[in-house]
Image (tube, coloured by chain):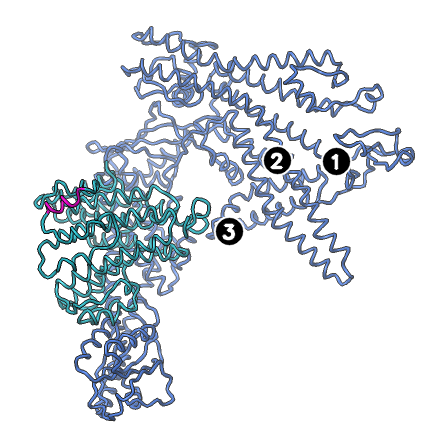
Chain colours: A cyan, B blue
Amino acid sequence: MGLTGDLWTFNVGCGGLEAIVHGLANGLLRQEDYHNITQCDSLEDMKLHLAGTDYGQFLQNEATLSSKVITERALDRLVNDFKWLRANAPWPLGEFLDYITYEYMIANVLKLISGARSGKGTLELLQKTHPLGQFEGIGALTAAQNIDDLYDLVLGDSPIGKFFQRTDRTDFDEFSMEYIRSLLHKNYLEHFYKFCEEIGGDTWMVMKDLLEFEADRFVVTLTRNTYGVKELQKDERKKLFPEVGQLVTVHEDLANIDDDDALKDKLRPFPDLYALVQDLSMDDPANSLENKFMEKSVQLHKDSLQRQFHYGSFFSLVKLRELEVNNLMWIAECIIQNHRHRINEYVNIFEA
Amino acid sequence: MPSPISGLWRSEDMVLMQLHMQREAAHDTILSLGHSGLVEFKDLNTDVSAFQRLFTNDVRRCEETERRLRYFEDQLRRSRMPINLEVPVQNENLDTLEPRLESLEQELRELNGKYEQLLDQQNSSLEFKAVLEQPPGFFRGDTGEQQQLGVRETTGLLETGRSGALRYICGVIEQDKYNLFDRLVYRATRGNMFIRATPCETPFEDPFTGKQQEKAVFVVFFSAQRVYDKIVKLCESLQASTYPYNIDNPREVQQMQSKVNDTITNLERTITATKAVRAELHNNIARNIYAWKRTVMTEKSCFNILNQLSYKGSTVVGECWAPKDGIDTIRQALTEADRASKAQVRSFLEVIDTDAIPPTYFRTNKYTEGFQDIVDSYGMARYKEVNPGVLTVVSFPFLFGVMYGDVGHGIFITLFALALIFAEAKLQAQKLNEIFEMIFGGRYLLLGMGIFAIWMGFLYNDMFGLVLNFGSAPYWYFPTDAQDAMAKCDDGYVRWHGVTADHTQACKLKGGSVYGFGIDPMWADTEGKLTFLNGLKMKMAVILGVMQMMVGEVLQLFNHVYFFDWKHILFQFVPEVIFLMFTFGYMDLLILIKWTTNWTAEMANNHTPPLILDTMTKFFLGVGAVEEGQYLYANEKTQQTVQMILLFTAVLSIPVILVPIPLAEFWSRKNRRNFEPIRGPRDGIVLLGDYQERQRQARQRKGFAAACAACYGTFDDEPKHKTGLPRYQTDGGGLPGIDQEDPNALEEEDTDFSEVVIKQIIHTIEYVLGCVSNTASYLRLWALSLAHAELSEVFLKYAWFRPLFVDPGIGIVAWGGWSAWFAFTLGVLLLMESLSAFLHALRLHWVEFQNKFYHGDGRKFTPYALREILPNPMQMKALVSGEE
């Protein structure tokens, strides 16, 4: 039954919040909403249509519309909903929700460092960070000049400090950045996985699938992205693979491969993953592995929202809502730039 | 026979009208109609998506203007400027208002931008000044008497004594961020630094949010040049501003100080001027904003309506529903609009025939509104259906009173309701909180409930659990033994009949007479009181219940008669009434017989009163059998015969409800199928009433006759209506039927027919079982009343009287007891109990009463009325003063 309680006791602490989450999930834009907004000729029309959805009057105080404004306001809405949930969450749901934000914190940290390296102003950079991934002193990251600084200055105290391990790399070259990103993400997944296991109950059952999928996705993507990268020793490559997921058993093999055929071969024992990679080709963007993983994860998140008495629905809601915001950005951009033929390439959350 | 009645009893006569206007006059006409608030427009462009409509751009302009107004409101909220709530006479429209507000917004934004910039500059100068004003010791590490935020020092760093060898940065930072800054700098320099800070005396106004911020002056000493960049970045990331300060050159400091002071004086002058200009602007806005807001909202609603009209060349056609008796007002509004818009072609109205079901519209007043709301929240009445709201006006508070009968509590509720009613005008103007607003909305309901609670309280002779005695000589006496009985009783020893009341002997008091009103006070504190009251209240509940259900049946009759539905009168109303009357109606009759029989005399003949429960059980299970000596009237034999006939008829009426209606439907369909090509009047299955007569009446009542046909399927063997809209046939349950033109109709008929059968089966079962369960359900009247009486008695006795008697004489305990009693009375009886009685009365109306006749599947008439849309002054005031 775990820390969350089950059928009997879950609702004592989290029933209300869970109901809100399911309500918000019901408010996700449906296929017909997407159909309507992709028909729009201008952002004004888009605003008009969105006014009829759960987004309501979220653009009413905007004098001029741009895809940036729409995205920002939509993201604000997500952030407000999330903050409200977080503010009302009892333990351990609160900690669980914090775990969701850690992913955004990691992304922010990397964004700030690479931004600072390219010499942009601190304030400008801070404005570009994801609002869910804010933490105290994040701005000071721009003062860091190498990885040790990074840890000493900020990360040590921050919630994501625990995901960080000292390595022998100290400079912020491009490779190191990617290396840190992978390392942080790996540790994040492992910690989150462990935390969910501690929570136990239905949460564990749902989150186990979700996180294992995330981990597998991460392993496969990392493997593909590091074909033949000389800086990365094979054993170091393996160190970046999270010790979570179906693929744990073949990590050794995956660390050594350098082409798609070998990858397919190694994934053959895992039917659902193999289904995603089997007709992989580098040229067709609509059919890319990334898209397939995305579709699969949407499916998993939707499944998670079908169940009750677990925390996974909070996680899934945030993920789906984030996708929705990205979709809105994509559609708005397509409308502005008049790329009608590509407007339907948003991530389909509810199939027609 | 029924005539077209309008009003609260049946909804207003509605007509569908077509409105033809010149295109140029459309705007003014719609506005004029909006002021009259009598028409509901139909959307004629349902197939056109929202952004393809003609006036979408204008709606957008309105929204843009509304956004400007919201900006102004926000500004006024900040400046706390009182707004003018009068509505000026001259009317502006969007075209004149838009450019004005646009330039106003621009002006205001520019001014605000300038102001923010100036404030920002002033803040920097003030910060610099604060840095410069620090005593030199602050920069040298003297601890002094200054209040310090914090000092961190690494030993040995300053021992060199030469500040020149050290580098330093000084600046100003928000106090909240100082600790973080301190920590970060410490880490960035690996502890190789010295930092100190002191708070600034005056807070700084944030130029963007207008909030006051506490700031602190800090100085950091460090040795390595390499660290300098890091610290500067840290300052940047924490929005700390750094200032050049030369520790070693006091003269330069002095010069800077006077320079900064000059700047500040200059800035202050400019800021004051800017503020004055801004205040002027705000004043201008505050004077007009309410009028602007009304104008924009009016225009927006108007454009939304215009989007629903259809445009052909230079004419505009709109369709709208309106109450029939409002046509004159509407015509007048049109004429006025024509005059105002100087249209060359006059707008005109045309009432059109339709098969569409009109919306339901009841004109309510302050008093009936609350009751109508109760009915509406169950379901809006069908067009022209009998409105249960009329009877609810009395029956609702009455049933509440039956459950809540207590003089004392009733007085409280009445007073509360009266208070609300007297404060009506004042409260209406305010924005109330949600729960209180609900109570306030039901104030007249509460008044009725209170009055009936008092009335029933007198009948029950109950006030806070105490008994009232108005001094009239009582009737009953309860002797303790035979001797007592001989002495006090009038005519010997009469047993009061109770269920387990062998020990409860009661008799008529010598010289006593029947107590004037309600229950005899002598019953108070006797052992038999509860049994006696239970018997009485239970029976009363059942009698009231059967009565209310019968009223429901009669209302059903009214509906059928009104819609010429003879089929349903004969095969639904009549058997249903027979069933109800011959079973539970008969039970009520037995109760009355039992009450009115002189049992003293009867018992002399060895005829003891039988239990009603037993009699009724035998009535149903023993087919009317009456046991020896258990008769209530005449004799065993007669009663048995009567009961057998009643039961037989009642059972027989069940198949009468079940079979004929689907059968009639079947025949009517069969006929129609056989004679499909024939168009014109033909004899379908008109079971009663003359077809010609019906048609004549139908013609008379054109407009809603068609709608009635659509509702009730009474005209379903008439020729098809000329407009060719789909028609509906029902068995009274609102079943969508078939269109005769439809080629697939034959197949559909079969499926529909099975639905008719199933519906009728369900209806029959529901009704028959419902008679039993609904009658039982009315027992809640007794149960709630019992609970109420018992609770108030218990609270009185145990919370107040007990402490009263143990009180040592100083009154503390008595006071405590009284407080507890009053708290219980208030919390449990006045709040919770009244709510529960209210809900049970609600249920009895919604379920037991309304299921006998009420369809409640109509659509509410929602006219385009500007007075509903526009904000009233109070709302506006709340909006601008920031109260939500």
**Residue B75 against residue B217 in the figure, above or below:** above
Viewer-proximal residue among B450 and B159: B159
Q: How many angstroms separate mark 2 from mark 1 (CA)?
A: 18 Å
Task: Output the chain of dot 3.
Answer: B
Q: Residue at x 38, y 84 (%)?
A: B147
| Residue assigned mark 2 | B398
B523 drawn magenta: no
Amino acid type at circle 2 is Phe
What is the chief secondary structure element of the magenta stretch? helix
Task: Output the chain of dot 1.
Answer: B
**Residue B39 against residue A187 in the figure, above or below:** above
Q: How many angstroms separate mark 1 from mark 3 (CA)?
A: 39 Å
**Residue B543 against residue B579 in the figure, above or below:** below
Residue interval drawn in magenta? A260-268
In the picture, the disc for residue B427 is 3
Side (left or right) of A85 relative to B161: right
Side (left or right) of B793 relative to B143: right
Amino acid type at circle 1 is Phe
Is residue B277 visible in this depiction of the protein? no
Amino acid type at circle 3 is Leu
Give the x, y percent position of residue B170.
25, 82
Give the x, y percent position of residue B601.
83, 22
Closer to the eye: label 1 or 3: 1
Which of pointers 2 and 1 lies earlier in the amino acid sequence?
A: 2
Viewer-proximal residue among B110 and B884: B884
Task: Output the chain of dot 2.
Answer: B
